[in-house]
Image (tube, rainbow, N blue to C red):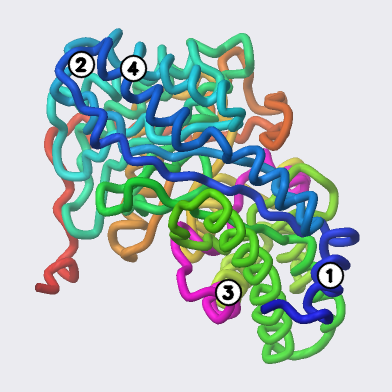
Amino acid sequence: MFGFYEVAETNKMIEHENLDVRTITLGISLLDCVDGDLSVLKEKIYKKIIKTAKDLCATGQDIEREFGIPIVNKRISITPISLIGAGTCKSIEDYVEIAKTLDKAAKVVGVNFIGGFSALVSKAMTKSEELLIRSIPKAMAVTERVCSSVNVGSSKSGINMDAVRLCGEIIKDTAKNTAKQDSIGCAKLVVFCNAPDDNPFMAGAFLGVTEADAVINVGVSGPGVVKKALESVRGQGFEQLCEAIKKTAFKVTRVGQLVAEEASKRLGIPFGIIDLSLAPTPAVGDSIAEILEEIGLERVGAPGTTAALALLNDQVKKGGVMASSYVGGLSGAFIPVSEDQGMIDAVLAGALTLEKLEAMTCVCSVGLDMIAIPGKTKAATISGIIADEMAIGMINQKTTAVRLIPVVGKDVGDTAEFGGLLGYAPIMPVNEFGCELFINRRGRIPAPIHSFKN
């Protein structure tokens, strides 16, 4: 039960500190939709999504209205489509047709994104999985709400470098296919190592095969609340700093727990997990960078940034796990450039580089996220950046991801405009020394020795 004081404090955080529930994500298994006939498969997928998600948005709006808690997004995640289409899709066009079906269903039920146009290829690719990956550039161009992801590595199986090389090419092609919108198709495509089965955040959400037929996962967010709390411990020691973050993370997660329980009860769908990530928006005061600067940095990217982010991430997890018995997904601090005004300002000031962002991903929950780079960047260079980030995830047994946007026709000094929650991003310089000979080797990088734990 939530006491009067807890409710009053929550209202204060909502009204003055940008607290929100970032997303209610309804996971839907499509395993029972498999059919050898593409037309029948599409019809089954469409009907399953419509039937399961028909009340999702209305329920979210009812909870918002009754409890006064902003719920920014209502979304759907589905079983990776490479599994559902494996016995049916014989061409790129077949997979594009499924993407169109997903987009149509998402529009009908009113969600802003549907994730799961995905392939899990950490060890090797089947022909069907390769076809899905090659269909991504066209699928992202002809749909509005479909998100795609490819898991190319894991701590147990290593890194599939054939898939890494292919993903560099696919990102380039996706950028070209959506060039008129500043290559926004790439904003809907994530490359993962150790992708979680229960992630509610786009663009990387999908429903793992170990999950139920349907499940409610909730992602909370509150950078503004954390920053406000840290203002009260300026100049104090690390103990006071950590306590302030933990207590705030607990309160934020409790809000997510309330929303998750209500959504689960009203929809008659089991509650899965709370993802207690700090996810920024372009709004002033809703920035991870500003939290790090409140901790004591002049600008994000300054010496000490990685240590400050490690502290923040760890204390968020410690506080959040006390507020919910089921914490999952990514859970930590997101550090996207385009969605965080403080990060954008740090890039423009010359304080934050791609290399420093890579170092920061060693201690945060995701990876190189929403980073705009020159459109002329080579596919092999993009694959090299992906390989570096996958190696961080593999060796450290954590989730890492890459969402790079090579903006066609733009270079360093220009700005890419995405709009909405995606915001805008300055084009960041990329190391132009070549890595083609490395990327063009065939096979996979083996799993590290500490993966042998059986």
Kindly identify which residue carries mark 2: 89
Q: Looking at the image, is mark 2 or mark 3 earlier in the sequence?
A: 2
Residue at the spot x=36%, y=28% of the render?
168
- Tell me how far mark 1 sits from mark 3, CA to CA: 17 Å
366 left or right, relative to 225: left
Q: Label 3 amino acid? A: Gly
Kindly identify which residue carries mark 4: 43
- Numbered disc 3: secondary structure: helix
Q: Residues within 10 Å of mark 2 (few under 14, many from 20)?
A: many
Q: Looking at the image, is mark 2 or mark 4 earlier in the sequence?
A: 4
Q: Nearer the viewer, residue 191 or 275?
A: 275
- Tell me how far mark 2 sits from mark 4, CA to CA: 14 Å
Residue at the spot x=38%, y=37% of the render?
78
Q: Classify the position of the N terminus by image quarter.
A: bottom right
Q: Nearer the viewer, residue 443 or 79?
A: 79
Kindly identify which residue carries mark 1: 228
Report if residue 337 lies within the magenta region: yes
Residue 357 visible in the snapshot: yes
Q: Is residue 51 above or below residue 276?
A: above
Contact between labelled residues 4 and 2, with CB atoms less than 8 Å apart: no
Kindly identify which residue carries mark 3: 320
Q: Label 2 amino acid? A: Cys
Q: Residues within 10 Å of mark 3 (few under 14, many from 20)?
A: many
Q: Classify the position of the C terminus by image quarter.
A: bottom left
Q: Nearer the viewer, residue 212 or 174?
A: 212
Residue at the spot x=49%, y=44% of the render?
26
